[in-house]
Image (spheres, rainbow, N blue to C red):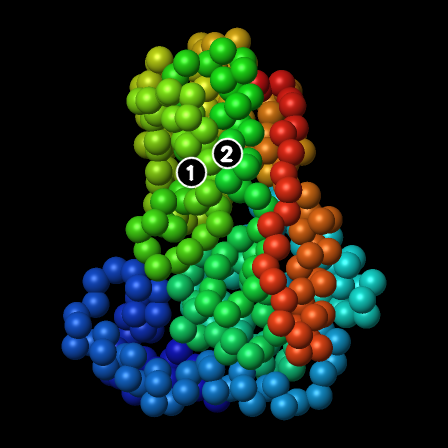
Amino acid sequence: MATIIDVAKKAGVGIATVSRVINHSGYVKKETREKVEEVIKEIGFVSNEIAKSMTLQKNNIVAFLLPNSTHLFFGELLNSVEKELYNKGFMLMMCNSSERIEKEIVYIEMLKKSRVDGLIMLTNNNIEPYLMKEFPIVSFDRRFDNVPFVASDNYMGGVLAAQYLLKKGCKHFMFIGDDAQGEHTNVNTEVSNRRKGFIDELKRHGVSGIVNIEYPLGDYNYIPESVYDTVIEHQEVDAVFANNDNIAAEVVKRLEMHGRRVPEDVKVIGFDGGRGGYQLNKTITSISQDPDAIAIAIVEILVARLHGNNVDSRIIPVTLSIGDTA
């Protein structure tokens, strides 16, 4: 069975180089990239082995590949999916990738060996070239060709955040998120629609000069300090919409450390539901995703694919959860 190590050896390059080629990240000489891609095709890395695994006997196990099981919403979703799968007669195998494509590829290989019946994927990496589309796969918050996905209504979440902040009389707005990747790479993520909905709605109301902070995609638990420095620098901003509750909580802490009151001086809205404590002594106003509704949709689609049926992707409604930060 071919591995990323086999690809590196045959191409005469390091594993990191193969990873950069797979992930389309970092500089790789054209000749080297073409050589690695040729080796991947030649030895049938990942795809051929997935095809073989489909002929094996089913064992009622579904794998859930996600970037970070400690992220609060991901943990909620994992719990809801496990319960829904159990009700359908399946067991769940959790695979934490730490957002590293090398680990995702290794897990896919491991899944083939374990003969899992289906795969739920939550990833920001360019893993599409290594997916066997006939394999029962469902994606969350991410679009792949010929693979059904489930996502929250991220665009409407942005709209709801803008409408609420406008209703509260805010005049100067800021968005913080890492989702620009959807426009600047071949990774097509639904999360980008949070920013789009927010900015579109503000523009519909004649708002301009929106401060848009975008940081490099990376660890969900790590945001560059420059992001929060920029928040403090913009003293005129009286409304912040953050891509998730973790960022929103840290923004609240930093603002209050610098003498700005939340929500009196600056109103802050997050995304995920505001259900975490975050040691703020206040709850976060947040766009709330419904992990149970998402889990039901994911499992229904997966079971349909296991029966060989074509199914449509689904968008799950969101709501605004009013807390103490806006």
Labels 1 & 2 near each other (Cβ < 8 A): yes
Closest to the observer, 255 or 119: 119
User: Of the residues shown, which amino acid type is indicated by label 1?
Assistant: Lys
Asked which secondary structure carries label 1, the reply is helix
Residue position marked by numbered label 2 in the rendering:
158
Q: Earlier in the sequence, mark 1 or mark 2?
A: 2
User: Of the residues shown, which amino acid type is indicated by label 2?
Assistant: Gly
Residue 134 pos. (x, y %): 55, 79
Q: Residue at x 35, y 31 (%)?
A: 212
Q: Residue at x 50, y 78 (%)?
A: 132
| Crowding near the residue tagged with mark 2, few <14, some 14–19, many ≥20 C-alpha atoms within 10 Å | many
**Res 314 quadrant in image:** bottom right
Residue position marked by numbered label 1 in the rendering:
196
Relative to 306, is 190 above or below?
above
**Res 156 quadrant in image:** top right
Disc number for residue 52: none
Q: On the picture, is 40 further left or further right than 154?
A: left
| Crowding near the residue tagged with mark 1, few <14, some 14–19, many ≥20 C-alpha atoms within 10 Å | some
